[in-house]
Image (tube, rainbow, N blue to C red):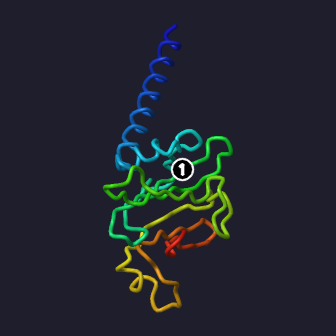
Amino acid sequence: MKACCLLLIVITTVQAQAQSTTWSQKRTIPRWARQEFKSHNLDRNYTVTYQLYPSYFRGDFDGDGRRDAVILVAHKNSGKFGMVIFHGKYPQTMHTQYFMLGAGKPFGRVGDDIKWITSWSMIAESKVSIILGNRRLPTFYGDIIKVEGKDGTKGLIHWNGKKY
């Protein structure tokens, strides 16, 4: 009987900790991005994941001067990972424009699953030439997301004026 009560207490404590961690993680994502996630009904097929730290970035990814957000997601049915980028909303618009990269949707040469990414970072547009040097680079229209895999695979995710 004592063992059963002890087990119940441990399970309850672990469950409470898991719920509070999830809630605090959700609160770190900007409220407007969480609202857009729901208003576009993305929560029907996707769930926000916290596989990488930080779990999101805020920046100007399309170079329009408005704050954007990128959030890690997973497709509920397939389990494929990806990210969704929400462009900053203009006051007269109802919803923001968003782009799903991976998570079951084809994305460049990467395919439809970015599970291989083990770290990511954001490079501010003003720091691109300093960090990447004088290599021959495409034109960047805003901040860049740099991704890396465990096997040494690296990539840059950037806006080309029309798509990522």
Q: Neighbour class for label 1 at 10 Å: few (<14), some, many (≥20)?
A: many
Q: Residue at x 51, y 47 (%)?
A: 49
From the top left corner, tell me how far across and down residue 58 is, in percent.
37, 60
From the top left corner, tell me how far across and down residue 95 is, in percent.
42, 51
Residue 65 position by quadrant: bottom left
For residue 7, side relative to residue 122 (left or right): right
The residue lying toward the viewer, choosing from 104 and 51, is 104
For residue 47, side relative to residue 94 (left or right): right
From the top left corner, tell me how far across and down residue 128 is, in percent.
41, 81
Q: Is residue 116 above or below residue 62?
A: above
Q: Residue at x 45, y 72 (%)?
A: 144
Q: Residue at x 33, y 65 (%)?
A: 66
Q: Is residue 157 above or below residue 127?
A: above
The residue lying toward the viewer, choosing from 2 and 63, is 63
Q: Residue at x 49, y 72 (%)?
A: 159
Q: What element does badge 1 sit on?
A: strand
Quadrant including the C terminus: bottom right
From the top left corner, tell me how far across and down residue 141 is, in percent.
43, 76
Q: Is residue 112 above or below residue 24?
A: below
Amino acid type of disc 1?
Answer: Val
Q: Residue at label 1?
A: 73
For residue 15, side relative to residue 79 (left or right): left
Residue 69 position by quadrant: bottom left
